[in-house]
Image (cartoon, grey):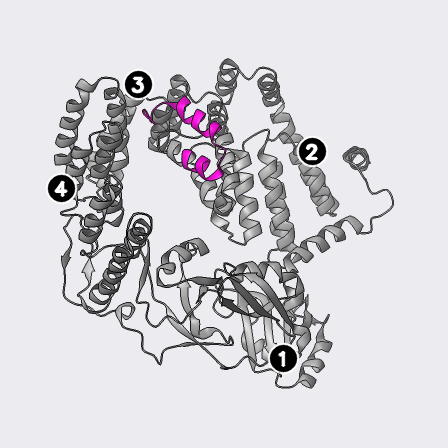
Amino acid sequence: MENPYDYNAHIQLIQSANDPEERKQYYQQMSLYFPLSPDLWLDWIGLEPESTIALCTKALDDYLSIPIYQKLLNEMIETGDFDSDLFESSLERTKHHFTESHLIWNIYRDLLLNQLENGQTTREFVNEQFLDRLRVQHQEIDATFYDYYRFESDETLLRQAQEIVDHTKKQQMKREQYESKIQQDPSLVQYEQYLEFESTHPERCLVLFERALVPYCLEPTLWESYLLCLVSSNKDPLPVVKRAVRNCPYSPNLWSVYEQGFGFLASLGDAKQLNPFLIQYLSLLVKRAAEDETKYQAVREWFDATLQVVRELPTRDPEATFNRAMAQMEYRIFVDQEKAKALYETMLKPFFYLSEAWLEYIEMCDPEEQRVLYQRATSKRLDQHQKLFYKWHEMEALHGTVESQLQARAKWTKYQKKHLQSEPVVEKREGQVLEPVEAKKPKIHKKLDPSEYKIIPNSNAGCMIYLCPLDSRIDQDKLQQAFQVFGRIIDIILQPNEESGELEAFIEYTEPIVDHGPVAIGELQLTPIRCKPNEHLWKFKTTRQENVLFVSQLSSQINKQDLRLAFAKFGKIKEIRLNIRGKNAFAYIEVQQVDPKKLIVTNLPFAMLEHDIQEHFHVRNINLVMDKRGKFNGTAFLHYETEEEAQKYLLLNGTQIQGRTVVVSIADPNKRQNKKEAAVQHKLNKREQKSKPVGQPKTQDDFRSLFYGTAKQ
């Protein structure tokens, strides 16, 4: 693209792209220069369903969009990647959206009712949430009241709710008039009149500004009014200023506010906060200069002068973000490759550890120059060494020879031995060039002791490594990219640990891996532990044949994730033994059997301790299930020594413990596999089939007539 600041050019590229991968790249490129509209974000998210949460979070920095919030929250619930703080902030941020806030409330309502069914919350809390919602002005308040009537049977509480609804509906009558005008004529004038009406209620006013900015994001006066509202409400305007200048870079008034914010941050002396504003201002200068080449030198002089100021700040940027931005401008906008290379050469002397900067530099060069730069870069102590080597191998596979590929592999082996085992640790300090410090020997830099293994009940454990604990941001794609340099990966299992609840991963290769050393994913250092089977042989004779499936005529490119997904309907899979022979493969798939000596108990009182459960069930081996906060969630697994003992305590099913009816059953992993889906369906059926007294309303109209009639009596 000749001019990346041409909005219409980006749109044309996106619309002309038939290949999904190409279209995703165009979206990524456009997002660097312009905020994307909600419709564009939703289209991009549809192309990358595996990145829904990350993309939705990024999209909400551009606009307040109810459909994007819906997609984000539903994805969190479906994947189990539940963030209660994000959920609550979503509800709070959208609750004053008069026409669409009910869409987010309905998701929250269903979640509350499910938690109530599972004993994870109290009826009083749910009742309180309903009443709080009825105090908020929203278009679907009658539907909310109807839901509350179906939930609550206490007439006193219902009368209280009716009084709240009457008061709220009286308050929102004028607001409904403005909403009606907006629907008939969604012009900027109508929005401005509505905003003037809402000016006495800052929270509703801010949400209304966000609604107006979706169709009128190119109106500088609307952004200026929004900023004034933020300042009047004692809220931070700087994030909105940044959005404003990205949408309206031609507005001197917005840039004036922007530069005031820039001056404020400069006075703080924090380069990390200052850099985004510097880069945005640099982008504006470059855009103006792109129309007149005589202005190129003026931009370069501004950069040199500003860089001197940045270097003198007390806190420097360890990522050299500002320097790299100017180098990319030289390469992509000014089309001066030599000046861009010179900037990278100067910058990489103090910032030699930045793998991303090396890759940006290498991208500008031809294959021969790339090879020289890869050799230079990999002789340094890098922050993401495996990523650089992976790109080097990729380049050699496309442009190199067999000899150059082997040399790159040998360089990687040498780098591992030199930097990951014996050299002193290098610490990255803000505002300083990296220097070796006194040698330390943390556990992650020790060579793996052959006696240190993770013992697991898997006959393929010799080809597996174990990682725990992991950060919640780690996913299968990141693990695949980080660990595939050591060999072909045929399986990755990412799951919470049964006892601690911490995130763990098992990675299986086609061949045993002797020594990995630590691996970095971003700023995280991961230390793999080799696995070892508790039994060395696959016991065909002792394994019941009905629990083992034999699958042949498989592709050699198959992996265990594909097999696990395809055969999940037969029950929880205990183990897959995959054999690859040339272009074909076959597999033995063992479905997990039920252990009659293992019981699961649910709906236990949350306050119970392990010794309390022992007193009731007379068992020594107990596993308590904890929630993300480390608190007991009312579920426990009991392991008895004999089947007879387990059968004896099955009789406690349905009995009361501290006022709660407990459920005791055999811990069948195959039945638990689809527990979530079955539980949701059961609750839905239970609500629909619940017996109702004579005269129970079937529709909202029946409900209103019945309830109002009762109220009059």
Q: In the displayed image of the protein, which residue is found farthest to the right?
A: 694
Left or right: residue 138 versus residue 267 is right
CB-based contact (under 8 Å), mark 1 and mark 3: no
Q: Position of residue 273 (x, y in %)?
A: 26, 39
- Residue 260 showing in the rendered view: no
Local secondary structure at mark 1: loop
- Residue 586 showing in the rendered view: yes
Residue on which disc 4 sits: 346
Q: Earlier in the sequence, mark 1 or mark 3?
A: 3
Q: Position of residue 606 (x, y in %)?
A: 57, 66
Tag in front: 4 or 3:
4
**Please, what is the three-letter code of the amino acid marked with disc 2?**
Asp
Q: Position of residue 275 (x, y in %)?
A: 25, 37
**Please, what is the three-letter code of the amino acid marked with disc 3?**
Asn
Q: What is the distance, in whole Å, between disc 1 and disc 3 at their CAs? A: 76 Å
Q: Which mark is residue 543?
A: 1
Name the residue rendered at 61%, 31% in the picture: 138
Residue on which disc 3 sits: 253
**Please, what is the three-letter code of the amino acid marked with disc 4?**
Thr
Name the residue rendered at 36%, 78% in the picture: 452
Q: Earlier in the sequence, mark 2 or mark 3?
A: 2
Residue on which disc 2 sits: 142
Residue 279 in which image quadrant:
top left
How many marks do you count on the picture?
A: 4
Quadrant for the N terminus, please: top left
Which stretch appears magenta? 1-26
Name the residue rendered at 34%, 30% in the picture: 242
Left or right: residue 506 versus residue 682 is left
